[in-house]
Amino acid sequence: MPNRALFLNRVTHCLARLSRREELRFAVLFLDLDRFKVINDSLGHRVGDMLLRSVSGRLQDCLRPGDTVARLGGDEFTILLDDIGHDSDSVEVATRIRIAMERPFHFEGHEIVTSVSIGIAPSNSTYTRPEDLIRDADTAMYQVKSQGRAGHLLFDKTMHEHALRRLHLEADLRRALERREFLVYYQPTVSLATGRISGFEALVRWSRDGRMVFPDEFIPIAEETGLIEQIDTFVMAEACRQVRSWQSRWEGDRTLSLSVNVSGRQFRSHDVCPRIEGILHATGFAAGSLHLEITESVVMEDAARSRELLVALRGLGVRVAIDDFGTGYSSLNYLHEFDVDDLKVDRSFIDNMGKERDTVRIVETVIGLGHGLGMTVTAEGVETLEQLRKIRELGCEVAQGYLFSRPVDAAAAWELLEADPCW
Ligand code: C2E
Ligand code: MG
Ligand code: MG
């Protein structure tokens, strides 16, 4: 197959022709297989290679003889549609490709179903360098991925602006780490048996030029760029230090638990165990009081590997919770094999309890499921006394939500602890 150099060469020719005859149109498509890594990791590189070969075969079948398909590397392909009538023609080709790829592939007794994400950069007279067309098609492809994969999109300028903003955000995040602009906020968790604070969940905040930035705005990019590992490590270390110091100053007779969120990246990093051990050692925090929260979607992705990782984590003596339960797709088969202590029912369920009759039954069922598997159950996002009454009645052990307190800074959390309220 043509490689990147040959592909660029052909696009250069098209650009040269375009400069002589404005009415000529062509398009560059950027195509990426969805979840290729999973296929490669689970079925091996040999099957991965067969798949790539078959994909390129199907691609050729979708094109005309004058078009060019190149492999950029990995599971990335670029396509040059030469001399097309209208931009909609390139969309048509993209659709055809997607349909062709949806037919299952068969190798060595495995049936593989895959999908592709395609970005399209239509030619125009402002392009002078072939790389820019590939870049824009790539940007559009990226947009498809971030919207949930398996689709195609035409590039437009706002995507470029969006990509630039991301780039700046990434640079700012790096600087924020150096300048220590991240803060840890604390939201109490309440034991429903006693009605008192049982611990805190640490939630990261970014104080950016005097404005408070919430995790939803920067965690996804921190995940992508890998910066999340440093953020998570900082949050865990800082929160362990803080809660440990509260514990030693506090007159209360209970041991405080601390929940921290562990990103998918952190969960799967090869040195997650020694890193957590190091933090526990450095801060003197008791392993048994540390709860690691991993979201349901992260745990269920590559569930077999997750199972091993969970065993290793629990080997450190810490507790593990599945966060945002109900928002992902749990395989019940795996759920019962997972070494997990706590299930956190996503706040959308608690929120809907008063609005939709069936949601109460769903919450009841989830609590029963958790208990049946030997887990304790936490309700997230409790905002009203009515919700509190309901989840208490349903046998939930722990609750968290604005009813008790919003996430607050360390000073306010300490005040709350000293006030020792009871619900
Ligand atoms: P999460 O772990 O499920 O945390 C609970 C989120 O729900 C928090 O949002 C909290 O402020 C919010 N919340 C709590 N009670 C209520 C309530 O009663 N009503 C409503 N509407 N919301 C409530 P926050 O702090 O914006 O964090 C959002 C998410 O970002 C977290 O969801 C967690 O997944 C992630 N996150 C936060 N801090 C970290 C961190 O240090 N590392 C990683 N990897 N992720 C983090
Ligand atoms: Mg959480
Ligand atoms: Mg949650």
Image (cartoon, rainbow, N blue to C red):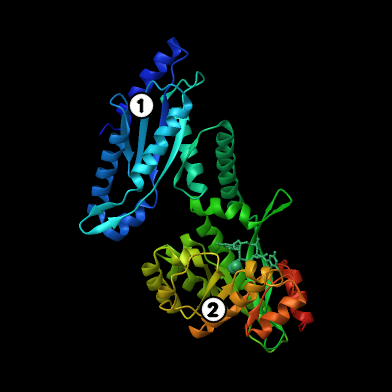
Compared with residue 33, is residue 228 higher up or lower down, i.e. above or below?
Answer: below
* Number of disc labels: 2
Crowd class of label 2 (few under 14; some 14 to 19; many from 20; radius 10 Å): many
Quadrant in which the N terminus is drawn:
top left
Instruction: Quadrant for residue 162, please give it.
Output: top right
The disc label shown at residue 8, or none: 1
Compared with residue 107, is residue 172 higher up or lower down, i.e. above or below?
Answer: above
Query: Residue 293 location in percent, x, y?
Result: 54, 70
Secondary structure under the numbered disc 2 in the rendered image? strand
Question: Which residue is most to the top?
Answer: 20
Gap in angstroms between the C-alphas marked 1 and 2: 53 Å
Query: Residue 50 location in percent, x, y?
Result: 23, 48
Secondary structure under the numbered disc 1 in the rendered image? helix
Query: Residue 200 location in percent, x, y?
Result: 65, 74
Q: Is residue 63 left or right of residue 267?
A: left
Q: Are the residues at dot 1 and dot 2 in contact (C-beta closer than 8 Å)?
A: no
Query: Residue 268 location in percent, x, y?
Result: 42, 63
Compared with residue 399, is residue 86 higher up or lower down, i.e. above or below?
Answer: above
Does residue 191 appear in the picture of this structure? no
The disc label shown at residue 342, or none: 2
